[in-house]
Amino acid sequence: MGWKEKFISKAGREILIKTVAQAISTYSMSIFKLPNSICDNINSLLAKYWWGQTQAERKLHWINWRKLCMAKKGGGMGFRDLHAFNLAMLAKQAWRLIHENHSLFYRVYKARYFPNCSFMFAELGNNPSFVWRSLLAARDLIREGSRWQVGDGRSIGVFTHRWLTHTPVPLNDAPPDMKVCELIDHDSRQWDRGKIDAMFSPQTRNEIMSLSLNNLNSQDSVCWMETEHKNSPFGQLIR
């Protein structure tokens, strides 16, 4: 906010905001979920700087900051939405707890917080660290944007897991803890059409029958469904 600030163009302000101001907190956001008040305060400071406001004056903000955080092709400036960016960075760490089962990071957290289950079903536990609380907050984002991919079907609950595009609709009473493997004819290595036809509505039946069973020898896995870059989830949030 010195005398040099008066000579910086809009392009220069954009570069400073993106490469300096919004980059400083990247490391912290990849470990901790920052309080919303802190993110709002940072956004407020950046908005004031963008519109050329100094401590001694107030200038009109012609466009809402949320609009400026949209991509340029959508009419914004491509600034980071710090709330979404924070969750995206934490979700990338949580994604490692799902797929990188041989890393030291995974072994330490599994021994401490979820020794008897997977990360997707872990609970908060007693005396949790702030890092663990932050990872669980990001897990909710993963649940919303991911889906289970059928392998051997032993880990997926028919009614308790998200593995279809809609909630399965049964035609009659079915065990609530039924596993997907119970719908597979392991002799023919195909779906048990007779059981599926008798248990589910036409919509559910057709979607189940359309799923491939090429990975019966592997375990079920979680796949990110919101973008086409499955090996790099949340890429659209991190600009």
Image: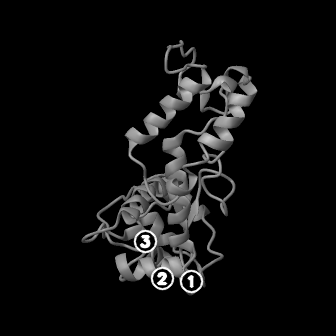
Query: Alpha-carbon distance for marks 1 and 2?
Result: 7 Å
Query: Alpha-carbon distance for marks 1 and 3?
Result: 14 Å
- Quick check: marks 1 and 2 in contact, CB under 8 Å? yes
Residue at the farthest front position: 3
Tell me which residue sits at (49%, 36%) in the image: 42
Q: What's under tag 2, amino acid-wise? A: Arg
- Residue 65 position, x and y percent, is 54, 26
- Residue 175 position, x and y percent, is 30, 70
- The image's mark for residue 102 is 1
Tell me which residue sits at (49%, 51%) in the image: 87
Comparing 149 with 197, the one in front is 149
Q: Is residue 204 above or below residue 21?
A: below
Left or right of 15, for residue 2: left
* Among the 4 quarters of the image, the one containing residue 168: bottom left
In this rendering, the count of numbered labels is 3
Residue at the farthest left position: 126
Q: Secondary structure at mark 3?
A: helix
Q: Give the mark nearest the N terminus, 2 or 3.
A: 2
Q: Determine if residue 150 is in view.
A: no
